[in-house]
Amino acid sequence: MNLQLENKFALVTGSTAGIGFAIAKALAAEGARVIVNGRSETRVTEAIAAIRAHIPSARLEALALDLSKADGAMETIKRFPDLDVLVNNLGVYEPKPFEQITDAEWSAIIETNFLSGVRLSRHHLPRMKMAGWGRIIFISSESAVNIPVEMIHYGVTKPCKWRSPVDWPKPQRERA
C-alpha cells in the first residue's frame, strides 16, 4: 500500500513497544522519516534496531525523553519544531482499585495519557495548517467506551483522546 508518506516527517510518541512500535515501523515502511520515542535510551535504541532489521532503509531519529512532562514536550519541540505527522500514542496503565488511586496518580495518568498529546499538538497544529498539510492522530482504545473496572483512571483518559483536542475547534460541518 502506498500512503504517500515518502519524505514526510513523523513523531510517534511511546513507540518503543506495542501499538506505537507497530505504527513507527509501518510509517518507516511507507518511506516516512520517523522519530522513535521512549523514556530510556536503551529502549529507543532497541526499537530502532528492530525496525532497521526489517526495514534496512528506514530513516529513524531517536528521542529518549519522558513526554508526560511539560519540559519533555518543550525539548521535543526545540529539537523537532516541524512535523508532518504526529501520532499521540503515549499511554500508561496500571490495574488498581478505584479507592486506592491517589490524586497524584490521577494527575500523572492524565498528564501522560492526554496532556502529553495536547502539548505537542498545540505547537504542531498551527504549523501544519500554515503548510497546508499535516496529520495529528490520538490513539485511544476500547476503554473509551468500556472503562475497565480495575483501571478506571486509565479508562477515564481514553475518551479525552477519542474526540481529540485537534478536532474540538472545528465547526460541525468540517468534521470528518
Image: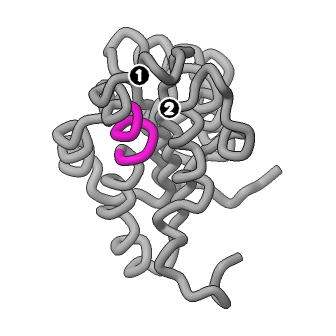
Q: Position of residue 138 (x, y in %)?
A: 55, 51
Q: Residue at x 47, y 35 (%)?
A: 90
67 w.r.t. 130: above or below: above
Q: Is residue 43 left or right of residue 104?
A: right
Q: Is residue 8 left or right of residue 76?
A: right
Q: Position of residue 36 (x, y in %)?
A: 45, 31
- Which is nearer the eye, 57 or 81? 81
Q: Residue at x 45, y 38 (%)?
A: 113
Q: Secondary structure at mark 1?
A: loop
Q: Position of residue 7 (x, y in %)?
A: 52, 55
Residue occupied by mark 1: 101
Under mark 1, the amino acid is Ile
Q: Which span of residues is magenta-colored?
A: 109-115
| Most common secondary structure along the magenta stretch | helix
Residue occupied by mark 2: 153
Evaluate whether residue 65 shows in this view: no
Q: Are marks 2 and 1 in contact (CB under 8 Å)?
A: yes
The residues tagged by marks 2 and 1 sit, at their Cα atoms, a distance apart of 8 Å
Q: Quadrant of residue 156?
A: top right
- Which is nearer the eye, 91 or 130? 91
Q: Residue at x 24, y 36 (%)?
A: 69
- Which is nearer the eye, 61 or 41? 41
Does the stretch in magenta take in 83? no
Evaluate whether residue 176 shows in this view: yes
Q: Secondary structure at mark 2?
A: helix
Neighbour class for label 2 at 10 Å: few (<14), some, many (≥20)?
many
Q: Quadrant of residue 29?
A: top right
Q: Quadrant of the C terminus?
A: bottom right
Q: Is residue 21 left or right of residue 42?
A: right
